[in-house]
Image (spheres, rainbow, N blue to C red):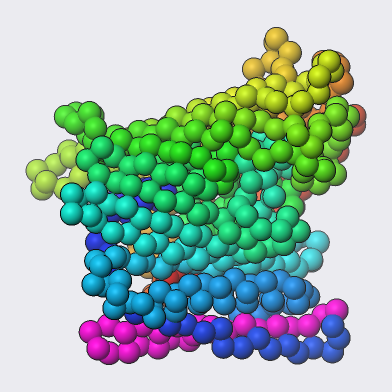
Amino acid sequence: MDHLKNITVEDEAPRVVSPFSCDVMSINGSGSSLRNPSLYIQAKASHTFRGQKFDKAKPATKFKNDLFKAQSLKALLASGCAIITSFAVSNNALAQDDIDLKVTGKVSTAIGIDDQGDFAGDVNAQVKVKGSKILDNGLEVGAVVEARYDEDQPRRGFGAGRLTGLLNGGPRGVGPLSGDVFVQGAYGYARGGFGKVVVGRDKGVARQLSVTAPTIFDAINLNDYQSDLSGLNDIHTVNDFSGYATKISYLPPANLLGGVVGGLQLGVSYSPKLSECGEDLCGPQDDRFNISEASLLTESSRWEDVLEGAFFYQKGLDFGSDGQKDITVGFGASVVTASENTAIPGVATFFDDYQAYSLGLNVAFRGLTLGGSVKSTNAGIRLPDEQDDDYFAFDAGVTYKTGDWAFLLGYGKSEANLVGATINEPTLARDTQTAQAGVTYFLGRGITIGAAAQYIEAKDNASSIRQEDSVTAVIETGIRF
């Protein structure tokens, strides 16, 4: 149901093989100085269908104040073009072998202003190439490669909120830690009557089957966001600690139990180990807080044996006689555990095995969707007996879609209580809450434009109460292909 949040399970729709070509047409610079250039990137894509060629040029995308960002995005687009055209050259051979090729992607931009009159912007892009073949015995085998441009994505998965946790999770992908372009995923899979098995660098089932509050945006969500122009948002309820670490995942066939339990999808993932911490690799993303004992982490410190279990259940309820489902309910839950291996013999630290739990629920009635989610985790920190978690977050929201228009109201809150050197001296006690209202309009051909107003309040209570707040107005554009 398109009323519900898009769950990131593989699309089962039939695939079509078409020869593609594309070209990064230009990158142009203008401006009075190198410190403040205005840059434009333009790309062109074409494909041939039933003997007729169609060309479409993407409008130029403008970048300000950062030549490197524009060059990086150009590199990502160029790599995507290279992948597409390399497959297109051998398209006839692929068709003869009944190999299906699917290229998808999305680009989002966010430009906004805060209540202090400061402007900010962000660009995100993803390209995904998937090839698959159905064997004579009915088994489907395939491989997927994903590339991503994202300047705000942390180098590692975070144990608590994005601003209040060690980066002790799995890697974001493969690429330079200082760069914004990286290979996000690369994995192979097999699917048949037994279900689906995935091996390689992919997100775990806890993220694949996650459910959060409904949203209408790609990047500027109040939870699990890609762009936060305020720099204060610490709310995160998606259970994605393992990141894109090498793992094996198994998802039984949908509706495995059948009957009244129809619409149930189960899954389990296992990652042998996450990357070693390296020099400062597991430290917090910024300098908002310091954990003195974090300096005891060595280059071989890591969390390992990451186990994820999750399920997603969807059920349509019919209260009328027209045979159509009046209400659709979607519910998801997950648990993630990991063993601590901080490799500090004889030294008592406050690190511990990682544990996290997440729940999410959406209810859709025609164009209206209500929902929310919650996550609780110890963040990989040893807790005193009287404390249940180091990080707790939830979100709630409602969306309404009518024709090409969509509207959103949302709220989220998080509480981080990370333990310091002694139980009575917490290093960080940070509370964050945010509210958002927004609207989007679908222009057609995968293009959406939207606007949102968001309020964020953050309180740090480590030694003295410090409160920060921000009101931002943001315009987001999204292109999917």
Q: How many discs appear?
A: 0
Q: Residue furthest top?
A: 385
Q: Residue at x 83, y 15 (%)?
A: 346
Figure quadrant of residue 48:
bottom left
> Would residue 397 appear left or right of 75 to someone viewing this image?
left
For residue 116, above or below residue 434 = below
| Residue 220 appears in the picture as rendered | no
Residue 308: image x %, image y %?
A: 49, 31
Figure quadrant of residue 432:
top right
Q: Residue at x 41, y 44 (%)?
A: 198
Image quarter where the C terminus lies is bottom left
For residue 242, above or below residue 56 = above
Residue 215: image x %, image y %?
A: 48, 52
For residue 446, above or below residue 56 = above
**Residue numbers of the magenta segment:** 35-60
> Would residue 374 appear left or right of 454 to someone viewing this image?
left
Q: Please tell me which residue lies in front, 390 or 87.
A: 87
Magenta span has 20?
no
Q: Please tell me which residue lies in front, 146 or 38.
A: 146
Q: Please tell me which residue lies in front, 405 or 148.
A: 148
Residue 117: image x %, image y %?
A: 79, 66
Figure quadrant of residue 249:
top left
For residue 476, above or below residue 466 = below
Magenta span has 57?
yes
Q: Residue at x 18, y 40 (%)?
A: 318
Q: Residue at x 74, y 23 (%)?
A: 351
Residue 154: image x %, image y %?
A: 69, 50
